[in-house]
Image (tube, rainbow, N blue to C red):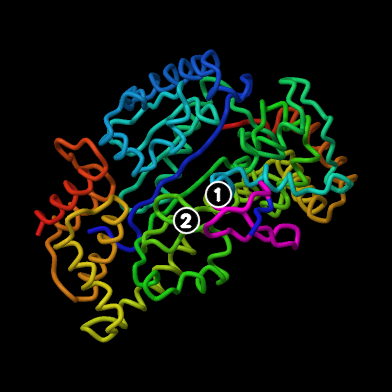
Amino acid sequence: VKDYLVHAAVRLSCNYADLPFDAGKQEKTAQIVTERVSAALEKTGDAYAYLLPSGLSERKKNFLLDRRLLHADTVHSPYSVAYLRMDENACVQTALADHLSIATFSEEGDVQSCLKTAKHIRSLLSDESALAYDAEFGYLTAHPCDAGTGMRATLLMNLPAIYAKHELLGMIRSHEMKQCIIRSAGGDILLGRCGVYCIENRVSLGMRTAEIAEQLLNSANALVEKERELRAAAMNGKDMALNDFVWRAYGITTCAQMITQREALKLWSELTMGVSIGAYALDDKVLTGMWEAACGTITLNNVQTQEEANVARAQFIRSLF
Amino acid sequence: MICDYCGNASAGKYLRVIFGGKARHYCPQCALQFQRGDALAMQMTFLNVSDEKSGYDAEKICPECGMRFETLQKSGSLGCSGCYQAFRGELAYLMTRINGTACHVEEVREEPEELNEAEKQLFSLQGELAQAVSMENYERAAELRDEIKALTASGFGGNAS
């Protein structure tokens, strides 16, 4: 069952040197980019599926968004096309803010292997046509914040004890955390909603990609260490506040009549800790099912409105117990 | 509270960011924009126009795509790879503020023992450039940039793979 480090993803952004950075808005540029990517990927031994993000089912889209293989800005990019590798761990998306967005994913949280794969794909794509590159600024991107390595590495972390004990702010001030950005799992700015966080590299320029990844892992390790320490202190009913916290989650999960996707994520996080500190035992399929409900990858039948979806989601979750 | 970026007052939690030693407060909408990667555009807005160190020139235009610096300042997005050349000074200044350096470290230098003379020279020049930019010695930085450009034009350093 996923816990602590839930998964890792890496995204490399880059552009073709001879094209303007307007593929997200100009169909003609987007078409040239797509043709080049098709030609480059055809030469590789790997099989890629050609996807139009606008034509994907909600379930499939959520699955790919959860794995960060599709960019969150996809909905604003009408000409974007995605090439999904058949193992569903790598994807090349075209015509976003940048011409190319190479995304890789690791279920095991192996950020270094994600990086290796992403760099390999970037190298294949650059064989077809030169990428925009500058000796001083590195890979040139539409947003100057991404220039340099063009890399955004993300680790999704489950840290409910840190959340419940309000330890995050103290952690952010520590030396290890200065090199990363912490967001809530949904990507919004409010960190106080649940214990699932994304941590991302702060800088993309002035360091090698491997160094950035290593720095991110150091930050993740500091968080995991703190989370383990807090959970260890709550084992066998010792910390009543944390035990109450996880039992409340259990109560809501088994009784609630409506559960939103965001709430499902919060409950999943807290139940995972409940199992981890020995408050109760749950079958793996319960936590896996809850994770799927939280990511929106379950099928909710005969649902027309948001309210109906929340009712169906709660029903699905209750049925897991 | 009034948002330092859009100037509007709205309800919700404000994001506090320290920029240039001063605290700025963003309303929830602007904070979202800030976190989505438009940080540079927002920081540019806060730059003092008369700050000579920034090399700020709103009238500057990219000869390749015709983008004005003013447009970059508003949108946070560049129009083409030529913009990096056209607005090099301004971008170097801002990228140093964000990343602590404006100098990319090439992956090719992961194994320094295999460097040839030209690579070693480039390595050294890039190190000096990073130092010059961080010391805000832009004259020296410009000289170093020209030297790097000459070296890369001679066949090394422009390999984007």
> Which quadrant: the C terminus of chain A?
bottom left
Are the residues flagged by discs 2 and 1 in contact, CB closer than 8 Å? yes
Q: Residue at x 20, y 64 (%)?
A: A252
Above or below A138: residue A184: below
In the image: residue A79, left or right of residue B150: left
Q: Which numbered disc covers residue A183? A: 2
Residue B35 has which mark?
A: 1
Chain ID for label 1?
A: B
Chain label for disc 2:
A
Question: On the rendered structure, is A273 left or right of A15?
Answer: left
Horizontal and vertical percent for residue A214?
A: 50, 57
Q: Residue at x 24, y 42 (%)?
A: A297
Q: Position of residue A169 (x, y in %)?
A: 51, 70
> Residue B155's mark?
none
| Magenta region includes residue A53 | no
Up/down of B2 relative to A61, above or below? below
The residues tagged by marks 2 and 1 sit, at their Cα atoms, a distance apart of 9 Å
Determine if the magenta segment contains residue B9: yes
Residue flagged by tag 1: what amino acid is it?
Gln
Instruction: Specify the segment rendered in magenta.
Output: B5-28
Residue A3 picture quarter: bottom left
Is residue B28 found left or right of A82 in the rendered image?
right
